[in-house]
Image (tube, rainbow, N blue to C red):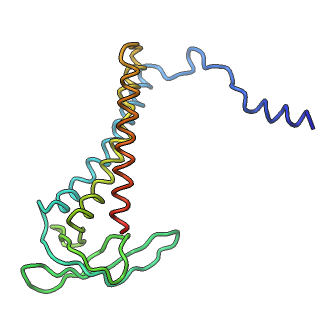
């Protein structure tokens, strides 16, 4: 019994620290940092159109009525709706947000392509800000990593504090956006 315990305990002991040549070199580190920045900026770039719709900068205002939601399995849904423009005219069949429920009626904006409607107002804006907040959270500790990579000693504590605060703000924004989207 004690041999088994020693084997399990030995599995959790820290191993040898990586020596020279076991960490990425300058080119590898540059590639990793570029990938990290790209990963953090992608949600910001991809959410610009939804933010413009939620704030009313683009799109046609109107009312979205969710007609049906079909389960795709694993908690995913495909929702269809009917969009009635404020200026009158025929209702348009659109894709509704997958977090909708059949029978929901909410203020929305029709995309310029006319294929989907995005909720407006405070809930629409908060849900549109979910992805940008996630991107900010991904980038939160990037200043610390830059200081570490370039072997700068000064400013690391401030970078960690800044990253922690930014991560907390990001988490709060993501949670608020998800709550707004699903309520």
**Which of the image's four quarters has the N terminus?**
top right
- The image quadrant that residue 106 belongs to is bottom left
Decide: is 35 above or below 104: above
Task: Out of 13 and 37, give the one closest to the viewer.
Answer: 13
Percent position (x, y) of residue 105? 26, 80
Extreme residue toward the bottom, this view: 90
Percent position (x, y) of residue 50? 23, 59
Percent position (x, y) of residue 112? 15, 67
- The image quadrant that residue 82 belongs to is bottom left
Residue shown at 56% from the left, 14% from the top: 20
Extreme residue toward the left, this view: 87
Extreme residue toward the right, this view: 1
**Which of the image's four quarters has the C terminus?**
bottom left
Residue shown at 24% from the left, 68% from the top: 119
Number of numbered tags placed on the structure image? 0
Residue shown at 30% from the left, 74% from the top: 96
Task: Out of 136 and 173, give the one closest to the viewer.
Answer: 173
- The image quadrant that residue 139 belongs to is top left
Residue shown at 29% from the left, 74% from the top: 95
Would you say 118 lies left or right of 151 here?
A: left
Decide: is 113 above or below 16: below
Decide: is 180 above or below 95: above
Percent position (x, y) of residue 57? 11, 60
Would you say 135 lies left or right of 49 here?
A: right
């Amino acid at each position: 019994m004690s041999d088994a315990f020693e084997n399990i305990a030995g599995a959790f002991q820290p191993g040898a620290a990586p020596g020279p040549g076991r960490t990425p070199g300058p080119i590898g580190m540059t590639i990793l940092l570029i990938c990290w920045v790209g990963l953090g900026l992608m949600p910001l770039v991809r959410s610009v159109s939804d933010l413009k719709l939620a704030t009313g900068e683009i799109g046609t205002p109107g009312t979205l009525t969710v007609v049906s939601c079909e389960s795709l399995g694993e908690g995913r849904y495909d929702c269809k709706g009917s969009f009635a423009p404020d200026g009158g005219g025929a209702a348009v069949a659109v894709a509704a947000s997958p977090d909708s429920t059949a029978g929901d009626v909410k203020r929305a904006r029709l995309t310029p392509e006319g294929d989907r409607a995005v909720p407006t107002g405070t809930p629409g804006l908060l849900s549109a800000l979910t992805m940008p907040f996630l991107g900010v959270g991904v980038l939160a500790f990037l200043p610390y990593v830059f200081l570490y990579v370039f072997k700068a000693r000064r400013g690391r504590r401030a970078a960690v504090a800044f990253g922690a605060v930014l991560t907390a703000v990001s988490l709060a924004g993501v949670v608020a956006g998800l709550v707004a989207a699903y309520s």
